Image (spheres, rainbow, N blue to C red):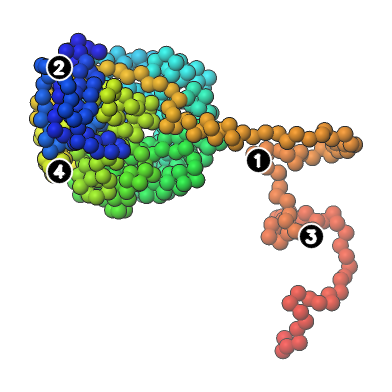
Amino acid sequence: MSSSSAMVRILIKGGKVVNDDCTQEADVYIENGIIQQVGKELMIPGGAKVIDASGKLVLPGGIDTSVHLEETFMNAVTADDYYSGTKAALAGGTTMVIGHVLPEKNESLLEAYEKCRSSADSKSCCDYALHMGITWWGPKVQAEMEKLVREEGVNSFQMFMAYKDTFMLRDSELFQALQHCKDIGAVARVHAENGELVAEGAKEALDLGISGPEGIEISRPEELEAEATHRAITIANRAHCPIYLVSVSSMSAGDVVASAKMQGRVVHGETTTAHAVLNGMQYYHQDWCHAAAHVTVPPLRLDPSTPNYLMSLLGNDSLNVVASDHRPFTIKQKAMGKDDFTKIPHGLPGIQDRMSVIWEKGVIGGKIDENRFVAVTSSNAAKIYNLYPRKGRIIPGADADVVVWDPEGSKTISVDNQFQGGDVNLYEGLRCHGVPLVTISRGRLVYENGMFTCAEGSGKFCPLRTFPDYLYKKMVQREKSQAVKAVEREPYTGEVVAVVNSGKRDLGAPDLDTPTRPCTRHGGVRDLHESSFSLSGAQIDDNIPKRSSARILAPPGGRSSGIW
């Protein structure tokens, strides 16, 4: 705890406290970076700064579970580092972010982690944690995952079924990675797209002369996401590992997640602000810059009803979390793919606008209520990543990460007044009703009415504990109750026939060992569906003596007595 936060006393008076399960009129007293009291007519010491929240809502600070800050990706460096990115997050009502570490293939996970920490610790303005990308697989990766969990406070790992030849894991590798996540109690995040078919689709589009941003949508149809989502859930179920699907972008993939939950699978889903608000017609815009600015993966979907559908899935708990997946690039960086859409860096901005845009489209749009808004922007993330109730809830003893939210206030989003990096804003001109007035992080007033009072490096790294109950409690109990056991029986004591060694292949040969020639499917000598015609004149049944004649008593189809 910093000395500055230890001296600050804040009383938020007259507001409505909104948690994920209830709303109540109450005052909130903060001291030493902790929420000390919640209720009416509080007895507090003097000298506290009073914030009048009459007619306002008092929310837990937002938790953005997917941000890419100071990251090199597809030959470009993101337009935000941990200072500018977390500053923009605070302006939008987010008080904690979880960033990504993406090691190169064969790079040490520990070295990549240390490199990220050394930069982020000195820059972050709010609390942060880190996901580790599993971009290759081997015994060294397994050992380093365990060390990151045990010694460094990392409790989540992200696997990729896409990005062939760079990040993609084969099914067998994904299965082993999920098994290892279960063994060490980590959150297994999976990006689900069929990487093999995506690569084929991109090649096919380029061969057809499609080189613009529309190629990203053409080469990655939603059926490839739905198939991979189903496959990922199946693999996770076989590995007895809870699974967390990231960037769910389509109705069909959302249905797969919802169906798996109905079947009792331990599955959680995260979508992004952009996927829940925008559609893929942006890729067909006449302005190349506008179209390229929307390139991300999975792509925005063409069906205009997709955003509303995803927002409804957030509302009914089929999807649990909405993240910004903030990865901002400038138009000049996107222009690296001006002649080839596969070279346009994937990523969209949104760390600052996430909460206001979801309030506008979700709460004002009638898809979710204020309590569900808190759940998908903060509380569920805290539960999944083992931060709850220290974060994600306004109760005595919790971290003082609090936002005073004005449900009647409004603002028009524009690139001209944003704090986040990049030279475009996807929601340009969108008028949002519902804005953060005051943001408190770790008990410090860091943002008020457009003014910052936070210092670079004042945020802290939050070590995350393993085996979150929200994911593992049900899974552990299920594994106990559904454990596979051998049948207890008397051993067989009878005779055993001698093995006949005919020189032929064993019938139990692996699937990859295909016979040299297909067997006939019918009992007769020659299968006319599998012709054995040979240009040499020799036939497969030449060695079988031919009968001189055969009398046909009832020819196929019966006797003919007609004019023929």
Query: In terms of secondary structure, where does tag 2 sit?
Result: loop
Q: Nearer the viewer, residue 139 or 329?
A: 139
Measured Cα–Cα span from mark 3 to mark 2: 98 Å
**Is residue 4 positioned above or below 269 on the image?**
above
Give the label, 1 or 2, closer to the camera: 2
State the residue in front, 226 or 48. Answer: 48
Left or right of 410? Residue 251 is right
Q: Which residue is mark 2?
A: 45
Amino acid at pointer 4:
His
Query: If you read the primary sequence from the N terminus, does the residue marked by circle 4 or circle 2 appear first?
Result: 2
Q: Tell me whether circle 1 and circle 2 mark residues in contact (CB < 8 Å).
A: no
* Residue assigned mark 3: 524
**Secondary element at image label 4:** strand
Q: Is residue 454 above or below residue 379?
A: above
Task: Give the number of the disc on residue 433.
Answer: 4
302, 277: nearer the viewer:
277
